[in-house]
Image: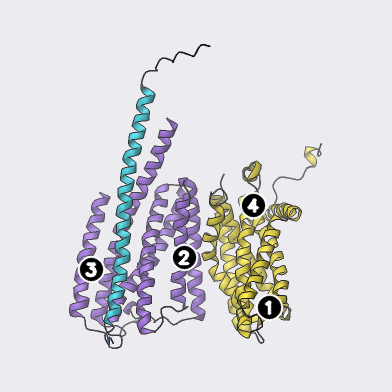
Chain colours: A purple, B yellow, C cyan
Amino acid sequence: MRERIAIGLAVGAAVLLSYNLYQMFMVLPDEAMQGAIYRILFFHAPSAIVGMIGYFVALTFSVLYLSSGKLRWDSLSASVIEVSLVFSVVNIVTGSIWARIIWGIWWTWDYRLTSALVCVLIFAGYLMMRRAIEEPTQRARLSAALCIFGCVDVVIVWKSIEWFRNNHPGPVLTIRTGGGTMDPAMERIFYLNLLAILLMAIALVLVRTRQEATALQIDSLRRLANAA
Amino acid sequence: MPGRLEDRPPLRMKTVQQALCVARKDLAIELRTKESLNAAGAFAITILLLLSFVFDVTSEETREIAGGLLWLVFAFAGALVFNRGFARELPNECLDVLLASALSRASLLIGKAIANFVTLLVVEFLSLIIFGIFYDIRWWLHTAPLAASFLLATWGISIVGAVFGALTVNLRLRELMLPVIIYPLLIPLLIAAIEITNLLFSAQPSLSEGLLWGRLLIVFDIVFTALALSLADTLLVN
Amino acid sequence: MDPRNFTFMFYGFLAAWLIVFLYVISLARRGARLKKELENVRELVSSSQRSTSSPVQSAEPTHKQ
């Protein structure tokens, strides 16, 4: 059942992405100031949004694990973090490539970039730590703690550096500005691409969660074999 | 015989008293063995010495990054201190005894954090003296704000180190995993500490900017201490 | 020179797709490895269960000095 949902989501994402790519390259014109490179935004910003949403969804799952003790929540949390990390890396890399042309530099220490990097460091550490622990309950407990502390930390980094350094472009989406800063046709493709990336992320999370469940099954069968 | 049962103090003490009891025990051990102090202190001095070869210590640019150099040294020395914090309870199953005792988990965690805090402060003070000599920095010009920022930043480092020191105590790769986990978490705190320290080492520190960074230190300390206290019972299990 | 900045746009798209593609490949490989490991462990469990349920073999004669 889960496999069918994952396949369905993946197919939906593929169809949407194909449509969006056609629109991006064949229909939408170049941007007045940036030329063709603005199209990176259609992957850069949705990846950031999906990544951030993922970390806070994982936070919820971590809290659920600590309150219920069910390893299913830990598997979900770890899967969501792994997929969110992939999209966070996409966000940082595409952002750097865009910035090289538009700002002339690969990197700057403004609040969004710094918090994005801190996020990646914290959750890369999370995944490294999970590989180092074999006992499932101990791994789940430590993962939940790191996820909770990590998410709180990211919020602190975001808000604190916002007080000091702000080079990143401001909001352009109508929901943030009330309208007039982004072409409506571009904004439509932006939201469609966000949906496509979200569907892709959910499909990947479902696949990864299934793998976590298999790994737990292998672990318990091994214990059974050793006990026999 | 230690005394009649009815004369002994009640087992149920307040969390703070329990925490201070744990801290006193750890600091007594540290005073006797000096294992963390020697390791962290020697490490800090060696790194400061090496850095003084890398940078031209008389130049103005080096003075501007002095805060960064100092806090990097403290962060790395801190990892050595936190590794020992809970690990010293492993032999003879002392940790199991502590967890099974009437001590609340929160007080055990805070007690360990206080012990880390005091040990790290000693290392920091010694390093500051050596640093002042090697780099010709007059750190005593704004002693009160410097002391306040050191206390706040060191507490933040200590509480995070205590929580993850407790969680990683049974891991095979503890010494490797603990730094990998805690350094990204400490980034906002270290940024604030570095900025305040650089401000206080400069000729005319800006009060408003210092207060802004100080606010970050306070927020970090409050939030992470509250998180540690609320999660202590769930996270510290046998 | 590239007035439309097309080259870097291409690099950006390439980077995004490559990262996701590499992740999907690693997921697929991990899935195959886990499937194989599950089969092996299931076989191990069933063989160990078979050996514990089989009749006890007669003891080997002890060596007489």
- Residue type pointed to by label 1: Tyr
Left or right of A154, for residue A208: left
Residue B167 seen in the current view: yes
Report the residue marked by disc 1. Answer: B135
Q: Position of residue A131 (x, y in %)?
A: 44, 52
Report the residue marked by disc 3. Answer: A17
Q: Residue furthest front?
A: C65
The residues bearing labels 1 and 4 have C-alpha atoms spaced at a distance of 39 Å
Chain under disc 3: A
Give the quadrant of residue C60.
Answer: top left
Chain under disc 4: B
The verdict on a common chain for dots 3 and 2 is: yes
- Residue type pointed to by label 2: Leu
Q: Position of residue A126 (x, y in %)?
A: 46, 58
Chain under disc 1: B
**Are discs 4 and 3 less than 8 Å apart at CB?**
no
**Are discs 1 and 3 less than 8 Å apart at CB?**
no
Tag 3: Cα neighbours inside 10 Å, few (<14), some, or many (≥20)? many
